[in-house]
Image (cartoon, rainbow, N blue to C red):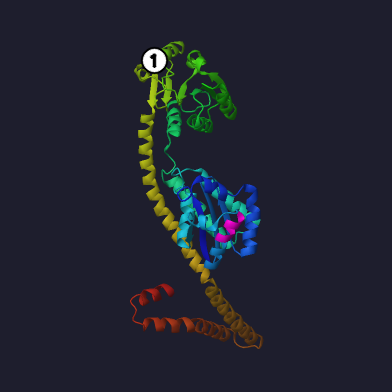
Amino acid sequence: MAIFALGINHKTAPVALREKLAFAPEQVPEALQQLSASLRLADAVILSTCNRTELYFSGDVEQSEQVLHWLARFHQLNLAELQQHLYLYSDQDAVQHLMRVASGLDSLVLGEPQILGQVKQAYNQSRQAGTINPQFERLFQKTFSVAKEVRTETDIGANAVSVAFAAVTLAKQIFGKLEKVRVLLIGAGETIELVAKHLTEQGAKHLSVANRTYERAESLAKQFDAQVLTLSQVPARLADADIVISSTASTLPIVGKGMVEQALKQRKHKPMFLVDLAVPRDIEQQVSELEDAYLYTVDDLQSIVAQNLNNRQQAAEQAGVMITSGAADFQQWLQLQDKADWLRDYRQRCEQVKIELLARAQNQLAAGQDPEKVMAELATKLSNRLMHSPTRAIRQLLQSDQPEASELVKVLVDL
């Protein structure tokens, strides 16, 4: 049986189609049972995230076609339209694709860590549904091992690759722990929401959100247990902030040099870290002239992000080597399983010879024959019987004049 990976992702399909093809968590058990029962698949795993829907399964080429038709029927989608956006990998390519996905090399943001947890969740759902057999058990355990190696031995996830995350990373470098740091967020759009998410993930607990529209600020603040301010309150509350991060659509600066200067005096010149993610700028450039104000603009962060992306690309190359090696290890194990019957049959034949000759020797001893002669005969007959077939095969190999034959013989007989 071959291993297949069938699916779509952010590279091959628009979000409108990805939404239609997504599996809700509660749908997955039923879908796995359908796949296993109706198509008689030995193994089946469904991975469904906002950026991809993928089915990993084992079977033959005909079954891979059946899975494609089943997928279209399950989501009531047009098969022809779906086929334009799908990819199908098999065997070594499928194994490498799974390992790349789990390691974050196939993500929208290179190296993002969440995908490994999502792959593990998909694997656990399949185990609970009973659609994981020894072959896929080994495949996914090897995948998790490779992904862990990529995480620990490369810098694939070490550097910020979004301006929001870069801003938070800089803040953490300056302040260390963020639990006691007071943060003022100006704006309430997607960028500030992402900044707030990264801040809380890094331990920040004291957040305030200021926005032109109070309702929008209130909606965002509820997500992160933050205080709500209006823009008119910013001058009076600025001195409370150790970190100020701003991203609005304002055409004029919201935070001026004089405002920051006054806040620094109230803070008794305790340093303030400011990040302006807006274009046009929310914070006057002259703020950077103040001795205790550390201002970073979106351009400053973009250069950091560009360098970090370059670093991640280099790490991705290292990770690619690890994945190729991991996939090769799995393929070797798979090939060995295919030949496992041969090894088992050979060992059973050897066991039968042992049992037969041992019974003969025990009968001879029971009949009163000389124990030394019985043992010598047992050893001679046992070695002759066990060596007969291998010796004949070795002789044929050596007579074949194949260059690699001699080396193979040395390995077989442990010379």
Q: Which residue is mark 1?
A: 257
Residues rendered magenta in the picture = 68-74
Q: Quadrant of residue 356?
A: bottom right
**Quarter of the C terminus within the rendering:** bottom left
Name the kind of residue labelled 1 in the image: Lys
Q: Is residue 113 left or right of residue 309?
A: right
Q: Crowding near pointer 1: few (<14 within 10 Å), some, many (20+)?
A: some
Q: Is residue 90 magenta?
A: no
User: Measured along the vertical axis of the image, is residue 381 above or below residue 282?
Assistant: below
User: Measured along the vertical axis of the image, is residue 381 above or below residue 154?
Assistant: below
Q: Is residue 410 left or right of residue 60?
A: left
Q: Quadrant of residue 292?
A: top left
- The chief SS type of the magenta part is helix
Mark 1 residue element: helix
Residue 128 in view (yes/no): no
User: Measured along the vertical axis of the image, is residue 130 above or below residue 290?
Assistant: below
Residue 308 in view (yes/no): yes
Identify which residue, 12 or 203, lies in the foreground: 12
